[in-house]
Image (tube, helix red, strand yellow):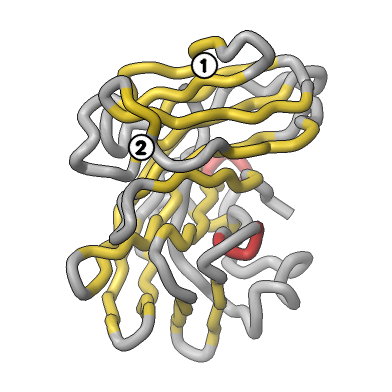
């Protein structure tokens, strides 16, 4: 269990255009932390901070921003909007933390959930896969996968991510909640050594769903 999730926005004209540009002033390397936004809602989302804006899709790779380097201890503010629902967000990350600000549909509006990890498991020859349970109604989530449908994660509590290193293989997984399948199987494709991935379980109006995102910092 190690790395993950984030918040904030600094100086950015668009998510795609900012992929190679620093968004925040950073302090000394030992004080840096990282933050990203993850759209786990059922519609497109926009995150605004002053004149900066990031747009996230409700499907595919575009539902998560990359992890932006930020100065640890700095209060990060942003406004999140999904449809007509708006929400103000405030997050502060500790040195070395990876913080994910997840946007989730709730009733007729939205809410944000902050997930934090402090990664220490980098291995250039193995892939790092994390599992995040964002469904507050699921007390014990799990993830199975591989040729033998092995248990990869079990008893994962809400907003308490778990992470492990696995061989860089082609991997498809199935999330479950309290022993029952939750959502459709998720195909992560061919994993790459040294790369990080997160499988996310979220609630939805039509039932639970799971998806994966790459934990990219560039």
Rendering coords of residue 8 (x, y %): 45, 66
Rendering coords of residue 80 (x, y %): 37, 76
Rendering coords of residue 189 (x, y %): 75, 36
Q: Residue at x 78, y 22 (%)?
A: 168
Residue 114 in sight: yes
Other-residue count near label 1 (Cα within 10 Å), few / some / many at <14 / 14–19 / ≥20: many
Contact check, label 1 and label 2, Cβ < 8 Å: no
Rendering coords of residue 185 (x, y %): 55, 36
Q: Residue at x 55, y 38 (%)?
A: 198
Q: Residue at x 64, y 85 (%)?
A: 13
Using the image, determine if residue 53 lies above or below residue 58: below
Q: Residue at x 27, y 76 (%)?
A: 87
Which residue is under mark 1? 152
Which residue is under mark 2? 133
Using the image, determine if residue 120 lies above or below residue 36: above
Residue 74 in sight: no
């Amino acid at each position: 269990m190690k790395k993950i999730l984030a918040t904030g926005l600094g100086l950015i004209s668009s998510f795609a255009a900012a992929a190679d540009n620093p968004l925040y002033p950073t302090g000394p390397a030992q004080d840096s932390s990282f933050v990203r936004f993850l759209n786990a809602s059922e519609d497109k989302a926009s995150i605004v901070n002053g004149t900066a804006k990031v747009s996230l899709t409700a499907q595919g790779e575009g539902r998560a921003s990359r992890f932006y380097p930020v100065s640890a201890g700095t209060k990060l503010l942003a406004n999140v909007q999904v449809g007509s629902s708006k929400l103000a967000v405030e997050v502060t990350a500790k040195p070395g933390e990876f913080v994910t600000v997840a946007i989730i549909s709730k009733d007729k509006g939205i809410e944000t959930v902050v997930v934090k990890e402090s990664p220490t498991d980098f291995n250039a020859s193995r892939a790092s896969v994390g599992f995040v349970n964002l469904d507050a109604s699921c007390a014990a989530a799990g993830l199975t996968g591989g040729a033998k449908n092995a248990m990869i994660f079990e008893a994962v509590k809400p907003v308490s991510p778990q992470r492990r290193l696995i061989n860089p293989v082609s991997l498809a997984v199935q999330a479950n909640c309290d022993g029952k399948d939750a959502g459709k199987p998720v195909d992560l494709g061919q994993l790459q050594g040294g790369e990080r991935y997160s499988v996310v379980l979220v609630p939805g109006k039509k039932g639970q769903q799971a998806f994966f995102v790459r934990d990219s910092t560039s």
